[in-house]
Image: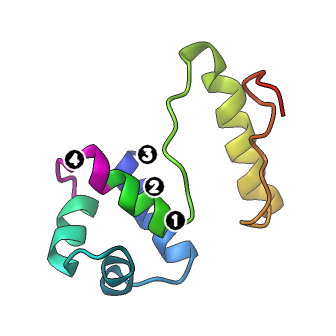
Amino acid sequence: MSLYDDLARRRRGLGFTQARLAERIGITRQQYQRLERGGNPRMDTLQLVADGLNARLVLVPLEKWYAVKALLDEEGEAGTPLDEDPWQGLLGEED
């Protein structure tokens, strides 16, 4: 899966059309559509999209990737509510 696939899956999971999400974050539908098709967005645009999807952009240390992936796979199966924070403490940081 690519970042673009993840964005589209998250958008659909929240029940947004491309047009609705684009309106929500203040860009055109065409701009958002290009992004989902594999465009090369600026970081601030990715941050806008993440905020619009009630998500966060994170840099995962490679040594923690499998733990994060396992959590994501588990979350998909368990149907964790979107307002819970399953990430808390995963990377060893303090609460």
Q: Is residue 25 found left or right of 53 in the rendered image?
A: left
Mark 4 secondary-structure assignment: loop
Label 1 – label 4 distance at C-alpha = 19 Å
Sequence order check, earlier mark of 3 and 2:
3
Mark 3 or mark 1, whichever is nearer to me = 1
Count up the numbered dots: 4
Q: Which x, y percent locates residue 83?
A: 75, 65
Q: Where are the magenta residues, as a range?
A: 37-45
Considering every residue shown, the one lying at the far front of the view is 95
Q: Where does label 1 land, which residue?
A: 10
Which colouring convention does the figure follow?
Answer: rainbow
Sequence order check, earlier mark of 1 and 4:
1
How many residues crowd mark 3 within 10 Å: few (<14), some (14–19), many (20+)?
Answer: few
Q: Quadrant of the N terminus?
A: top left
Q: Where does label 2 land, which residue?
A: 6
Check residue 42 in the rendering and tell me which mark sits there, or answer none: 4
Label 3 – label 1 distance at C-alpha = 12 Å
Mark 2 or mark 4, whichever is nearer to me = 4
Query: Residue at (78%, 21%) from the top-left corner?
Result: 92
Secondary structure that dominates the magenta span: loop
**CB atoms of marks 3 and 2 within 8 Å:** yes
Label 4 – label 3 distance at C-alpha = 20 Å
User: What type is the residue that disc 2 sits on?
Assistant: Asp
Mark 2 secondary-structure assignment: helix
Mark 3 secondary-structure assignment: loop
Q: Where does label 3 land, which residue?
A: 1
Query: Residue at (72%, 35%) from the top-left corner?
Result: 70
How many residues crowd mark 4 within 10 Å: few (<14), some (14–19), many (20+)?
Answer: few
Q: Is residue 45 found left or right of 13 in the rendered image?
A: left
Is residue 42 shown in magenta? yes
